[in-house]
């Protein structure tokens, strides 16, 4: 996914009210940008962090900038927009670039299932069981090269896992796909210390046959793209 216009660098002043961030541009101008991420953003909201904003001239938008990328030590980057993983994964599924799911030609987004949910992607192919794919954005890193999910309590995430287990029990494929939207991680695990209930839900879903996939990403101020498969450790971080 290429960004529509060139991004503009600046330094984060602070992020607040979940969806707002004040940024000082390189010419000294201070602007308020939309932060498309309601999560805790641990390690990605420190004052002084170099960030990249997408300008827009749409009069219908309240803010003229959107925060898209955070620059990390060692030349690494993290994507901020939590909507990006679904766009990137959806495109990869339609072009059959995710090997475990490449046999499916029909890809439907946002299909109702379970009791109160929509599955991110429903895949269908004659002769194969339907595949229900849930995508999660991952951008927490606290130790070594581990990417961790979640970065805060997510009752919704635990509910999705339970519904995927029900789908699997009905004879379909059920897939949890973790999209690591930062470039300095090489493996994925559950952050049980941040959400023990989610960790229990992951273990139960795995035991029920829910497939756990993870993919890296290539993030830069120009684009966010699908990377390569990463190993997923179901055992929780304590």
Image (spheres, rainbow, N blue to C red):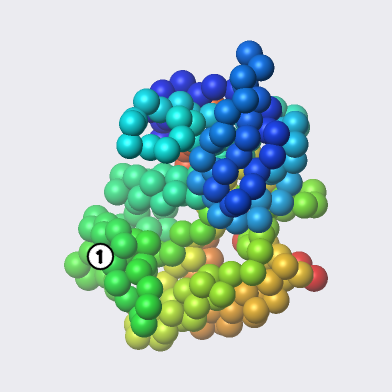
Q: Residue 206 or 64: which is nearer the viewer?
A: 64
Hey, which quadrant is residue 104 in on the image?
bottom left
Q: Quadrant of the C terminus?
A: bottom right
Relative image position of residue 128 (x, y in whole percent): 27, 70
As drawn, 158 above or below 51: below
Q: Position of residue 43 (x, y in %)?
A: 73, 46
Disc 1: CA contacts within 10 A as few (<14), some (14-19) or many (>=20): some
> Element under label 1?
strand
Estimate the x, y position of residue 74 in percent, counting from the top left.
Answer: 75, 30
Residue at x 68% of width, y 27% of height: 11
> For mark 1, what is the residue?
124
Query: Is residue 183 something one can see in this rendering?
Result: yes
User: Residue 165, how many percent across, how many down?
Assistant: 46, 81
| Residue at horizontal 46 percent and vertical 35 percent from the top | 63
Q: Is residue 99 left or right of residue 19?
A: left
Q: Residue furthest left?
A: 126
- Which image quadrant: the N terminus? top left
In this rendering, does residue 76 appear at all? no
Q: Residue at x 44, y 49 (%)?
A: 83
């Amino acid at each position: 996914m290429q960004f529509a216009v060139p991004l503009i660098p600046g330094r984060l002043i602070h992020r607040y009210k979940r969806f707002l961030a004040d940024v000082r541009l390189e010419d000294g101008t201070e602007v308020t940008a939309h932060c498309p991420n309601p999560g805790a953003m641990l390690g990605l909201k420190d004052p002084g962090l170099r960030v990249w904003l997408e300008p827009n001239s749409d009069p219908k938008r309240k803010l003229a900038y959107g925060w898209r990328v955070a620059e990390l030590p060692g030349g690494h980057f993290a994507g901020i927009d939590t909507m990006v993983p679904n766009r990137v994964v959806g495109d990869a599924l339609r072009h059959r670039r995710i090997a475990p799911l490449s046999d499916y030609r029909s890809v439907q987004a946002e299909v109702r299932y379970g009791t109160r949910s929509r599955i991110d992607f429903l895949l269908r192919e004659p002769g194969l069981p339907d595949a229900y794919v849930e995508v999660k954005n991952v951008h927490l890193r606290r130790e070594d090269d581990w990417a961790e999910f979640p970065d805060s309590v997510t009752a919704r995430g635990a509910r999705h896992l339970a519904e995927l287990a029900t789908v699997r029990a009905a004879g379909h494929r059920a897939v949890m796909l973790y999209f690591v939207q930062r470039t300095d991680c090489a493996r994925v695990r559950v952050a049980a210390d941040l959400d023990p209930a989610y960790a229990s839900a992951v273990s139960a879903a795995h035991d029920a046959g829910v497939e756990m996939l993870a993919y890296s990403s290539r993030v830069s101020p120009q684009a966010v793209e699908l990377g390569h498969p990463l190993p997923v450790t179901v055992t929780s971080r304590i």
